[in-house]
Amino acid sequence: MNRDLVAAAAALATALWAPTAAAETLRCNGRIAAEGDSRLSVVYKCGEPVMKDSFCAPVIDLRGGTFVPPAATGWGGVPCQMVEEWLYDRGPGNLLARVRILGGTVLSIRYSRAAD
């Protein structure tokens, strides 16, 4: 009985101390933009970003290889998916927010001191 109690206490302690994965959010004008929001929702909540960028991210082949997209050639058969990155300047004393959008949906929100 005592051994079971110790095992249960150890399991509970492990569960309480285990790190949790938390999605980042972006607070703008009293509203919160979060991962999974639509592009339109972010613009509504936060306004236009100070900078926008887009690039063609390589698509992973199911056979295990990676297709690396060539330079922009205008050919429609490039095996890649367009990703947008938006940069929000949140004012003095705040980190910059980088919002990554894939397929019209916020994929991630990250914070940094510089725009690189």
Image: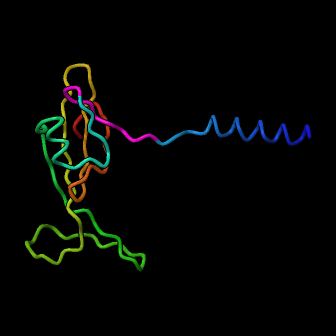
Q: Quadrant of residue 56?
A: bottom left
Horizontally, residue 98 falls left or right of residue 63, namely left
Q: Is residue 91 above or below residue 6?
A: above
Q: Where in the figure is residue 13, as x and y percent of width and height?
A: 70, 35
Residue at the image point whose x is 71% and y is 37% from the top: 12
Q: Nearer the viewer, residue 50 or 71?
A: 50
In the rendered structure, the answer to whether residue 101 lies left or right of residue 74 reads: right
User: Number of labelled discs?
Assistant: 0
The answer to which image quadrant residue 24 occupies is top left
Image quarter for residue 102? bottom left
Q: Is residue 40 left or right of residue 25?
A: left
**Range of the magenta residues?**
22-30
Q: Is residue 84 magenta?
A: no
Q: Quadrant of the C terminus?
A: top left
Residue sticking out furthest to the right: 1
Locate residue 97 relative to residue 13 in the image: left or right. left
Direction front: furthest residue: 1
Q: As rendered, which of 73 and 20 lies closer to the eye?
A: 20
Q: How far from the left and from the top, in percent, is residue 3?
A: 89, 41
Image coordinates for residue 20, horizontal then vertical, percent: 52, 40
Image point (22%, 37%), residue name = 115
Residue 71 in the image: above or below residue 27: below
The vertical placement of 80 against 16, above or below, is below
Residue pictured at 28% horizontal, 28% vertical: 95
Colouring convention used in this rendered image of the protein = rainbow
Q: Magenta includes 26? A: yes
Single out the residue that lies furthest toward the top.
93
Q: Which quarter shows the N terminus?
A: top right
Q: Residue at x 31, y 35 (%)?
A: 111
Residue 63 x, y percent position in the rendering: 41, 80
